[in-house]
Image: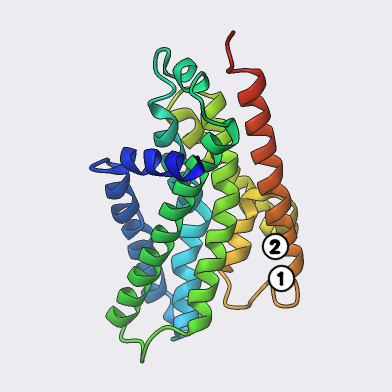
Amino acid sequence: MLLICIRTEVMKLRRSFVWLTCFLIPILPSVMGTGNYLGNLEVVGVSWYSLWTQVTLFYGFFFFAPLISIYCAFLWRVENFGHNRNVLMTAPVPLSCIFFGKLAVTALVTVITQLWVFLLFTLCGKYCCLPGLPPVQLLFWCLRGALGGVVIAAAMLLLSMCIRSFALPIALSLVLAVIGVLFSNKGWGLYFPFSLICYGMNSNTDIDRLSGNMLPFFLSCLFYFSLFSAIAIQLLRTRDVKS
C-alpha cells in the first residue's frame, strides 16, 4: 500500500514546477557563494574546502529548508483544496502510508537536490580553477545534509498539512532556518531540528563539526523524524477524519 501511495505522489511531480524549483533555485546560492569566495581569497584561502564554506553559507542557512518546504507544500496542495482532504481520509489506505508516501517522495527530491548542489559546487570550483575534483568527504557532507533534510521534510509536511496556505509554511521555514543558524552558532545545533542540515553539511566551516559526534547527530535526526511523523499521523487520525 505504501508503494501505491509513493507512486501516486510521484505522479503529482510529473511536469510540475517542483523540478524547476529543484534545479534553478540552487544556482543562486552557488553563484553567490562563488562570488563571495572569489572576493575573499586572501581571507578564506584557495581550496575546495574554502569554496564549500562560502557556498553552504548561503545554501545551508537560507535556501535548503525553504526548498524542502516548497516540495512539501506542493505535495499537500491538492488535498488542501475544497473537500479533497475528506476524500483522501475516506480512502481505504492506512493514514501512515499517506504520510510516509509523501515523505518518501520529498526525501527523494531532497537527495536529488543535494546531488545537483554538489554538481553545481564542482562546476563552480572548476570555474575558480581549483585543482582536480572535490574531496569525497565533501560529497559525504552533502549527503549527510540530506539526512537532516529528511527531518525538515517531516516537519514541513506536518506544517503544510495543518496550514492550508501554500506560502505560509514556506515563510515559516525561512524563519525557522534563521533560528537554526542561531542555534548552530551557539553550539546547540544538535538540539534544534532546523540546525541539523547545517550541522550535517558543515555549512560555513571547513572543519567537520560532527567528527566524533556522528551518533548524537543520527540520534537527533531519528528523534525529530519520529516525533514529527508521529504527530502528523495522529493529527490525521483525529483532525481530518470526518464521520
Point out residue 119 in the picture as x, y percentages from the top left corner: 34, 71
Determine the residue positioned at 48% across, 79% down.
50
Is residue 80 depicted above or below 159 in this figure? Answer: above
The answer to whether 156 appears left or right of 73 in the picture is right
Amino acid at dot 1: Met
Point out residue 156 in the picture as x, y percentages from the top left corner: 55, 39
Amino acid at dot 2: Phe
Q: Nearer the viewer, residue 36 or 97?
A: 97
Circle number at residue 218: 2
Circle number at residue 195: none
Can the viewer see residue 147 in this picture?
yes
The residues bearing labels 1 and 2 have C-alpha atoms spaced at a distance of 6 Å
Few, some or many C-alpha atoms within 10 Å of disc 2 (few <14, some 14-19, many ≥20)?
some
Determine the residue positioned at 51% across, 67% down.
143
Point out residue 190 in the picture as x, y percentages from the top left corner: 73, 58
Residue furthest top as drawn: 243
The answer to whether 239 appears left or right of 76 in the picture is right
The answer to whether 128 appears left or right of 109 in the picture is left
